[in-house]
Amino acid sequence: MTGRARVFGDDINTDYIITSRRKRESLDPAVLRKYLFEELDPRFAATVEAGDVIVAGRNFGCGSAMEVAVTAVLGAGIRVVVARSFSRTYYRNAVNNGLLPVECDTGRIREGDRLAVGDREVKNLTTGVTLATVPLPEIMRQIVSAGGLVPYMKRRGDFSL
């Protein structure tokens, strides 16, 4: 996957991704995308393009276990989040919904850099730097490739590799 880096810092909680009051209004990803990161930058959602890559520091997705925080990201056409680390619940919600969580050192990625994200590395096409990633377990790669846990189960019927 290639895309433009949209960079955030450490401890981006689920209420920063999509404020919990928005889920009371709608759970439609097309609606939620309009409010993505509004608490941090009210103009952000209007600038998002399908294929953008969210890049963050440590503990991305901390806070409440709102699955809608993944739904809003996917609704914006974002298919991958690259972070130094993820909260456990956001990481699992991402995999279960078909959003690729990639862990690596994000300190040298800047806003607007063009990234090529693969299974084992993130290449910064703007700077030429290649970053090693923490490998996603095979079963999780298969779930993400299937589009999430439900499509995976519909195809496979179980968790065997």
Image: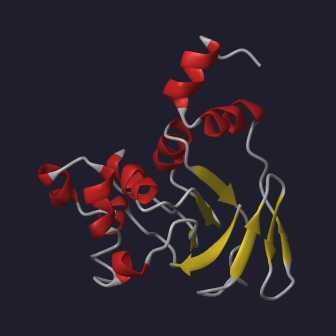
Q: Quadrant of the C terminus?
A: top right
Q: Is residue 11 left or right of residue 41?
A: right
In the image, 149 versus 147, the foreground residue is: 147
Furthest-top residue in this view: 157
Q: Looking at the image, which residue is at 80% across and 52% down?
A: 119
- Mark yes or no: residue 156 visible: yes
Residue 83: x and y, percent? 62, 66
Q: How is the image coloured?
A: secondary structure
Residue 70: x and y, percent? 42, 51
Q: How many marks?
A: 0
Q: Looking at the image, which residue is at 24% across and 63% down?
A: 19
Q: Looking at the image, which residue is at 42% across and 62% down?
A: 76
Q: Quadrant of the N terminus?
A: bottom right
Q: Quadrant of residue 73?
A: bottom left
Q: Is residue 73 above or below residue 55?
A: above
Residue 100: x and y, percent? 61, 50
- Mark yes or no: residue 65 visible: no
Q: Quadrant of residue 157?
A: top right
Residue 28: x and y, percent? 26, 48
Q: Looking at the image, which residue is at 18% across and 59% down?
A: 22
Q: Is residue 140 above or below residue 54?
A: above
Q: Is residue 94 left or right of residue 120?
A: left
Q: Is residue 35 left or right of residue 4?
A: left
